[in-house]
Amino acid sequence: MMMRYTTILIMLFMIGCGGCHDDKPLQKVELSPETEQVQISFRRFDRDLFNIDFNQPTVASQQLYQKYGSFFCNFVEYDLMLAACNSDSVGTLLRPFVNNRDIRETHDEIEKVFTEDKIESINEDLSECLQRWNHYFPDSIIPTVVYYQSAWNANISTQDSTLAISLDCYLGPDNKITKQLYGEAFPNYKKNNMDEKFMVADAMKGWVAWKFRKYYEKKTCCLS
């Protein structure tokens, strides 16, 4: 019953986001002036990672951790599976990643595809959706949105106060980088979903699912 309720909630919530359904405009609930003034924070971890000086790897990793906290830990421990984020070796292990030819080429392609204007448009759509989240759940945390490059390990990553979007997963099915992906992990239907038009919807579905995760963890425990 709760699963069905959550699915309906996600559908109704997504309909309320103008950026998710611009081609099918529907009457939306008007937001209060206070909700419309809620500011959403956006960060570019992808740029910070590739622009930081890794000649002093320990200092570099400490700077990234200080700025991004638990998200940085999730990135190095789960996305890349390098080491514990407080390990002295993290910076040394990250340097080959950012210098990898394929990873660097993908980063350059991200910069070409996701221009400042395009990112600004996405930010506006996400802001509207997260303002609506605040409208319906005023006591819930409003996440900081972080753009990053997961090396295709995850398109959306969520923590308690962070909603992270991996831009390499949304370059588009016809992009040269996406076309180069192969193997059982990247069938054509997955490549077709690697389109920026799905980004905002994927992000909000990921955030809503994360906020309801504790209920399902509890139910799974009780049913075992």
Image (cartoon, grey):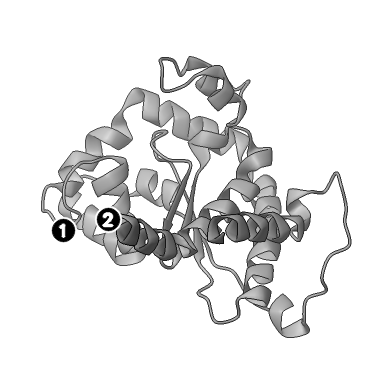
On screen, residue 133 above or below 114: below
Q: Amino acid at mark 1?
A: Asn
Decide: few, some or many residues near mark 1? Use Cα within 10 Å; few <14, some 14-19, many ≥20. few
Residue in view at x 32 percent, y 36 percent: 98
User: Which of 165/190 is in front?
Assistant: 190
On screen, residue 205 above or below 212: above
User: Which of 3/58 is in front?
Assistant: 3
Q: Quadrant of the C terminus?
A: bottom left
Whether residues under marks 1 and 2 lie with C-beta atoms below 8 angstroms apart, the answer is yes
**Label 1 SS:** loop
Residue in view at x 54 percent, y 82 percent: 139
Q: Amino acid at mark 2?
A: Cys
Position of residue 80 measured from the top left corner of the image (x, y, whole percent): 28, 40
Q: Which residue is mark 2?
A: 73
Image position of 126 (left or right of 67):
right
**Label 2 SS:** helix
Position of residue 165 measured from the top left corner of the image (x, y, whole percent): 50, 48
Position of residue 207 measured from the top left corner of the image (x, y, whole percent): 52, 58
**Disc sitting over residue 138 in the figure:** none
**Disc sitting over residue 86 in the figure:** 1
